[in-house]
Amino acid sequence: MKFPRFQHLYCGFTLDLPYRHKWGISLESEKRWINIKRDLGSELGRDIKVYKLALPVLYARTFEKLVFRVFRSLKYNGLKQSTGRTEYFWSVNIFTFLTLWDALTFFGFQDGFYW
């Protein structure tokens, strides 16, 4: 009988690839992101800063498959050689969201629809 173990389900992004984010799982997410940062930096030709959130969860593979199924139509295939390049998806980044939120609030859209 195989018992489940904790793995890190992570999501991350970089401002050098705006409107894209990466999902994945790893036993050691910090080491994984060091490799991702190195490979992305060499592919993009500059040093980059990455932002990430990793959560230890049971059955991380199942959650990862669910996330990939949800974001399937938003898959990003623009990277050619970096590690984990198949796990990137298009998204609206937090800066775009906050700018849009501020603009809607400024113009009086307070009905809660965009919340």
Image (tube, grey):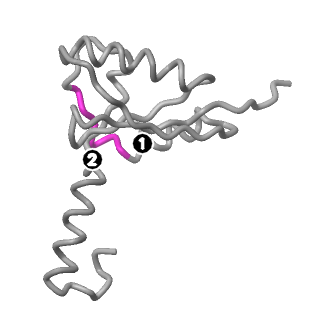
* Residue range of the region highlighted in magenta in the rendering: 71-77
Q: Position of residue 91 (x, y in %)?
A: 27, 47
Q: Position of residue 2 (x, y in %)?
A: 81, 24
Q: Residue at 23% of width from left, 26% of height from top? A: 77
Q: Which residue is mark 2?
A: 91
- Compared to residue 3, the image places residue 57 above or below, namely below
Is residue 72 one of those drawn in magenta? yes
Residue 86: which quarter of the image?
top left
Residue at image position (48%, 31%) is 24
Tell me the quarter of the picture where residue 57 sits.
top right
Closest to the observer, 71 or 36: 36
In the image, residue 33 above or below residue 42: below
The residue that disc 1 covers is: 69
Q: Amino acid at mark 2?
A: Ser
Whole-percent x and y of residue 104? 18, 76
- Classed neighbour count for the residue bearing mark 1: other residues with Cα under 10 Å, few (<14), some (14–19), many (≥20): few
Image point (16%, 72%), residue name: 103
- Looking at the image, the residue that sits furthest to the left is 107
Q: Nearer the viewer, residue 75 or 20?
A: 20
Q: Which label's residue is closer to the chain start, 1 or 2?
A: 1
